[in-house]
Image: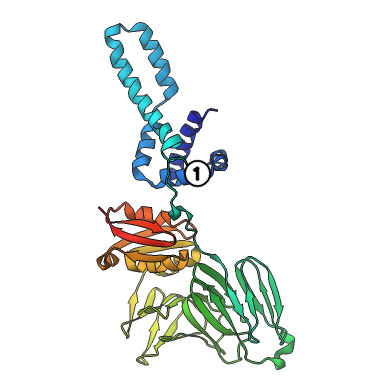
Amino acid sequence: MNEFEQGHIIAEIILAEKERPLTEKEQQQLTDWFAQDAQNYFLYEKLKYDENLTNSLKELGRFDTAKAFAEFEQRISKTRSIKISQVLLRVAAVLVLVVGTYYFFQFQLSPQNVEPTQELAIKPGASKAILKLADGTIVSLENKRTDITESDGTTISSDTNSVVYKPNTRRVSERKLQYNTIEIPRGGEYQLTLSDGTHVWLNSETTIKYPVVFAKNKREVFISGEAFFDVVHNEDAPFIVTTDKMKVNVLGTAFNIRAFGNEAKAATTLVRGKVNVTSTQTAQTFMIKPSEQFIIEEGNPSVRKVNVKKYTAWTEGRILFDDNSLDEIFTDMARWYNISVEYENEALKDLRFSVDVKRYDEITKITEIIELTKKVKFELNNETITILKYD
C-alpha cells in the first residue's frame, strides 16, 4: 500500500469514527498509522475536530477514484477531441480534491512545515497524592504500591490511583483518634477509602484531613478543595464534612462538595440521600434533597435546583461545562492541566460556553471547541495560556 492509498483509508476511518464505533480492523489500522510517526496522532486530532477539514474529507469520501480513472480511460477512447476538455475538467476536479487531501496529510502538517506548539504537549492531570501520617512521615502515592501498618493495627494500602484504610477490629481498645492528611497537588487526583468504607474522590489542589479510625459516635473529616463523598450509612455515627465556609452533616449519602480557599463561592451538591448544611458565617442550616445544591456566594447561603451531572462529571472521567463563564472553565482547567491562564482583557472572562470532553484528553480538545465559536482564540507560551479576542 502506497502513502496515497493509506492516507485515503485513514481519512475514511476518521469519518467513520464520528458516526459509529470503529471495527477492530479499523482501530488497528489507526494504531499502526500512529506508530509510523509521532506527528500522525496530532494530524489525526486536527482532522477529527476541525469541522472544515471534516467536510472536505466527506467530499473526498464520496468519490471512487479508481472508478473515476476507469471511466476517464473509457471515455477518452470514445470521445471526440472537442469533448475531451470537459471530461478532463470533471476528472481533474476529483483529482484536485484527492491530491489536495493527500498534500495536507503529507506536507501541510508534516514535521518540517509545522511550527512546534507546546499546546499539544499540555497533558491532563494524573493520579498522584502526598500522604502525611500522624507521626509526620510523608509518603508519595504516585505510581507505586504502598503498604503501611499503623500502631493500632490499621493497614493502609495504596495502588496507582487509590488508598484504602482497613482497621484491625481485634484491637479496638487500643484506638486513639489520630489524623492523617492527603494532599492532591495541582494536576492531580486520587481516591480514598476511609476506615468506615466511605469512598472519597479527591480533585486537584484538594486537602483532606481525617482520622485513621473514626470515633464511635462521630465521623468527621476536614477538607479544602473539591471532593465527592459516597458515605456508608451509620445511624449511630453521623458523617460530618467541615470546611471554612460550611459544615455538612449526613448519615449515608452521596454528594459533591467544592470549597476552595481562594474562591468566593462554596457549594454542596446532593446526588442521593439527605444532607444538613450549616453556613459557618451565618449559622443558618438548610436541608437539601437530591438534585439540589447548597451554595454560599458573597457570604449569602441559599439552595437551588441544579443538573447534578455538571458537578459530578469529573468523577466519571469527563469535563462538563454547561453555559459556564470562561473564567469558571479555565479556573478548573488551570488546576487540572497545571497551567497559568492570562486574559487579553477582563471582559473575556464573562463570555459563556458549553464543553463536554473526556477528562484525560489534551487541552487542545477544549480550546479547539471554544475557538469554533469565533469569540476567542488561544496562545501558548511555555505553560501559560493567553486568551485573546477572536480577530
- In this rendering, the answer to whether 290 lies above or below 219 is above
Please state which amino acid type lies under the numbered disc 1. Gln
> In the depicted view, which residue is nearer to us: 53 or 320?
53
Label 1 residue SS: helix
Q: Position of residue 73 (x, y in %)?
A: 40, 12
Residue at 71%, 93% in the rendered image:
173
Disc 1: which residue: 39
Name the quadrant of the N terminus.
Answer: top right
> In the depicted view, which residue is nearer to us: 288 or 83?
83
Residue at 43%, 43% in the rendered image:
114
Q: Position of residue 368 (x, y in %)?
A: 37, 52
- In this rendering, the answer to whether 112 lies above or below 335 is above
Q: Position of residue 35 (x, y in %)?
A: 57, 42
- Local packing at callout 1 (Cα closer than 10 Å; few below 14, some 14-19, many 20+) is some
> In the depicted view, which residue is nearer to us: 336 or 304?
336
Identify the image quadrant of residue 388: bottom left
Residue 223 falls left or right of residue 181 = left
